[in-house]
Amino acid sequence: MLTTRMFTVPVYYRKFKCKGGDCRNSCCKGWDVTMSTDDYFILQGMDCSKKLRELLDRHIRILPHPTPDRYALIEKTFDGDCPFHMTNGYCMLHTQCGEKVLPNICHYFP
């Protein structure tokens, strides 16, 4: 069953563009990045580099009481970063595989 969600967003939201490595913030620092069942199986089934596959296998966990909308979690690194956030400021998932594989929460940021 699909649900409709309403979001309150700043006026500038529609004009927002990611600055990538030039951004002074990290879009996922400290966040609990959850994903839907669809997001999870897209990531599990995609063709990617060995390094990315190892990160996926190590840092994605199915939640204890999963639902279709909140099925799995990307476990943060020790310092609170997303394990896919590279030192150049870009996302490894996005860089290697494109926007189509990003979990919904990553699509909706900021």
Image (cartoon, rainbow, N blue to C red):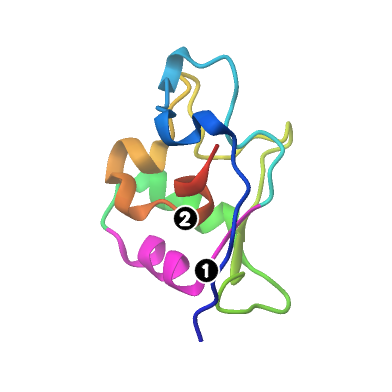
Q: Is residue 81 left or right of residue 93?
A: right
Q: Is residue 18 above or below residue 108?
A: above
Circle 1 sits in a helix, a strand or a loop, which is it?
loop
- Asked if residue 52 lies left or right of residue 68, the reply is left
Give the camera-side residue of 78 and 32: 32
Quadrant for residue 58, please give it.
bottom right
Residue at left 58%, top 65%? 5
Residue at the far bottom in the pictured view: 1
Quadrant in the rendering for residue 6: bottom right
Q: Position of residue 2 (x, y in %)?
A: 49, 80
Is 82 drawn above or below residue 23 in the view shown? below
**Residue at the spot 40% in from the left edge and 45% down from the top edge:** 52
Q: Magenta: predominant secondary structure element? A: helix
- In the rendered structure, which segment of residues is drawn in magenta? 33-46
> Considering only vertical position in the picture, is 89 above or below 38?
above
Q: Is residue 36 magenta?
A: yes
Location of mark 1 (residue):
36
Label 1 amino acid? Ser
Where does label 2 land, which residue? 103
**Is 12 displayed left or right of 47 in the figure?**
right
Pinpoint residue 19: horizontal percent, then vertical percent.
42, 20
In the rendered image, which quarter is residue 31 located in? top right
> What is the distance, in whole Å, between disc 2 and disc 1 at their CAs?
7 Å
